[in-house]
Amino acid sequence: MPNRREQRRLSTQPLEIYAEAGEALTTSPDVDVVTFTGSTATGRRIMAAASATVKRVFLELGGKSALVVLDDADMMGPAQMAAFATCSHAGQGCAIPTRMVVPRARLEEVVALVAGLMGRVTYGDPADPAIYMGPLISERQRDKVDGMVQRAVADGATLVTGGSRVDPGYFYTPTLLANVNPDSEIAQQEVFGPVLVIIPHDGDDDAVAIANNSIYGLSGAVFSGSDSRALSVARRIRTGTMSVNGGAWFGPDAPFGGYKQSGVGKEMGKAGLEEFLESKTLATVIS
C-alpha cells in the first residue's frame, strides 16, 4: 500500500495532466475554439491564455443565482424549490439558486418553511433510492464549505439549520442562513455546497437590485401570484435563464449560458451549434 504522501501525489497527478492538456489546447494555433465548463477563476485563465492566438472561447462558469419571491406569491412553491434545489447534487451545481430573496414582511414565514423542508432532506449513500443527497466531492471541498458557513455566522448571519460536517465521508448537512448581508462573502461567492442564504427585500425594485448585485448571471427564478408581474421582474434580472412561477427552462432546444462572469456563449439549441461555426462570404463574377 502506498504511504500517505504517495497517495496524495497519486491523487493529484490526473489534475496535473488535465492542466497540461488544457494549456496545450488554449495556446495551440491549431485549435480554433475552446469550450470549458467550470469555475470562473479557471475561465479567466483560459481567456487570457487563448488571447495569444485570438481563438474563440465558449465558457460556462460559476453562478450565484437568485430565487426572487414577490409579496403576492404562495410561499410553499418557492420554499420547496429553494430547499430541494440547494441540496440537489449536495449543492454542487452552477445554476442552483442559492440566494433566496423574499419580502421582508414574510421573512419569518419563509425561513420556517424552508428550514422544515431542509430538515426532511435525507443524506447518505447515493446508491440508496431512499437517499436524496450524497456527499461533497472531497474533504477539501467540505472544509471550504464549512469555512464559508462559519465565517458567515461570525459576520452576523443567523444559522437556522445545518452547518456541520457528518462523518464518515464528505457529507455536510443541509444548511440555511438568514439575516445575511447581501454584500457578504456567503451571498456573493459560489459555495458549491448545500447552503442557502435568505435575504429580505422591500419591494420589486429592491428585489431586482439584490438579484443583480452579483458578478454572476447564470440562472434564477421568480415567483408571483401574477404571471405578468413575475415576467416583468424576470426580464429585469441580468441572467441567462430564469424559471418563472416554477417553469422549467432546461431543454435540448433551449440555449443555456450566463451573463457577466458566468460565462461567454451558449450551449444547446441552435445557439449552441453556432458556437462551433463561422460564417464565410464568397463572391464570384458571373460570366
Image (spheres, grey):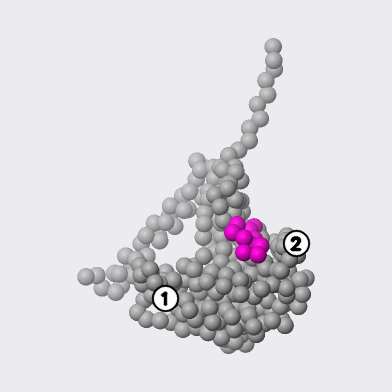
Q: Identify the element where label 2 is drawn.
A: helix
Q: Which mark is residue 123?
A: 1
Residue kind at label 1, given as amino acid type: Tyr
SS for tag 1?
loop
Q: Which residues are magenta?
A: 240-249
Tell me the residue at 57%/70% (across/down): 81
**Dominant secondary-structure state across the stretch colored magenta:** loop
In the shown orientation, is residue 69 left or right of residue 169? right
Quarter of the image where the C terminus is located: top right
- Tell me which residue sits at (54%, 45%) in the image: 33
Q: Is residue 250 visible?
A: yes
**Is residue 5 shown above or below 247?**
below
Residue 228: mark in rendering: 2
The image shows residue 99 at horizontal and vertical percentages of 62, 73
- Tell which of 40 and 118 is nearer to you: 118
Three-letter amino acid code of the residue under disc 2: Ser
The image's mark for residue 216 is: none
Would you say residue 150 sits in the magenta stretch? no
Magenta-drawn stretch contains 248: yes
Instruction: Let me know if residue 216 appears in the view.
Output: no
Residue 90 appears left or right of 53 = left
Snapshot quadrant of residue 66: bottom right
In the displayed structure, does residue 22 sit left or right of residue 109? Answer: left
Question: Disc 1 or disc 2, which is closer to the eye?
Answer: 2
Near-viewer residue (2 or 250):
250
| In the rendered image, the vertical position of residue 158 relative to residue 198, given as above or below | below
